[in-house]
Amino acid sequence: MELSSEQKEAVKQWINDGAKLVDVQKLLSEKFNVKMTYMDVRFLVDDLDLTMRDPKTEVKEQAQPEPAEPETPKQGVTVEVNPVQRPGVLTGGNVRFSDGVQATWELDADGRLHLGGAAEDYRPSQEDIADFQEKLRAILSGNV
């Protein structure tokens, strides 16, 4: 889908104001009645050569010294395979990400991975995605 110059300028402004991809997706729908997938919005931001602001990095740059209390260690990602699979699904199961969010996963006949069961706007961290993929690959190859 090709956006008008007005729509592209709005996207640039939203990104510069610190909007996340999911925010841009919602704003395009609400303001311009443009329906785009999350991935299409990601490609759009890349095509417009925009850089996402990372609020975590900005906060760290302005942050005071670390508190004396150690942080609670994350539990990591756990992946399970369901013993009985739904029709049309090669395999599937459950995943718990390091932040405690639980979701379901399925691998369809075309090899596409689907996540579900979590909040619609939930996005696991890049580290969790990499950990999930690594553990899933190990399970599916029988190396567990």
Image (cartoon, grey):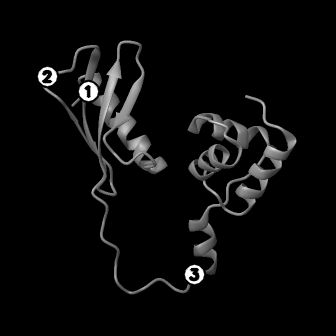
What residue sits 59% from the left and 74% below the top? 59
Q: Residue 5's spot in the image, x, y percent? A: 86, 42
Describe the element under mark 1 as helix, strand or loop: strand
User: As rendered, which of 71 and 37 lies closer to the eye?
Assistant: 37
What residue sits 47% from the left and 83% below the top? 66
Q: Which residue is mark 2?
A: 84
**Quarter location, residue 88:** top left
| Residue type for callout 1 | Gly
Tag 2 and tag 1, C-beta contact below 8 Å:
no
Q: Residues within 10 Å of mark 1 (few under 14, many from 20)?
A: many
Q: Is residue 62 left or right of 32 when viewed as pictured?
A: left
Of the residues under marks 2 and 3, which one precedes in the sequence? 3
- Give the Cα distance between marks 3 and 1: 42 Å
Of the residues under marks 3 and 1, which one precedes in the sequence? 3
Label drawn at residue 35: none
| Residue type for callout 3 | Ala
Q: Which residue is mark 3?
A: 63
Q: Which residue is mark 1?
A: 92
Describe the element under mark 3 as helix, strand or loop: loop
- Give the Cα distance between marks 2 and 1: 9 Å
Is the C terminus in the top left, top right, bottom left or bottom right quadrant?
A: top left
Q: Residue 11's spot in the image, x, y percent? A: 74, 49
User: As rendered, which of 68 and 128 lies closer to the eye?
Assistant: 128
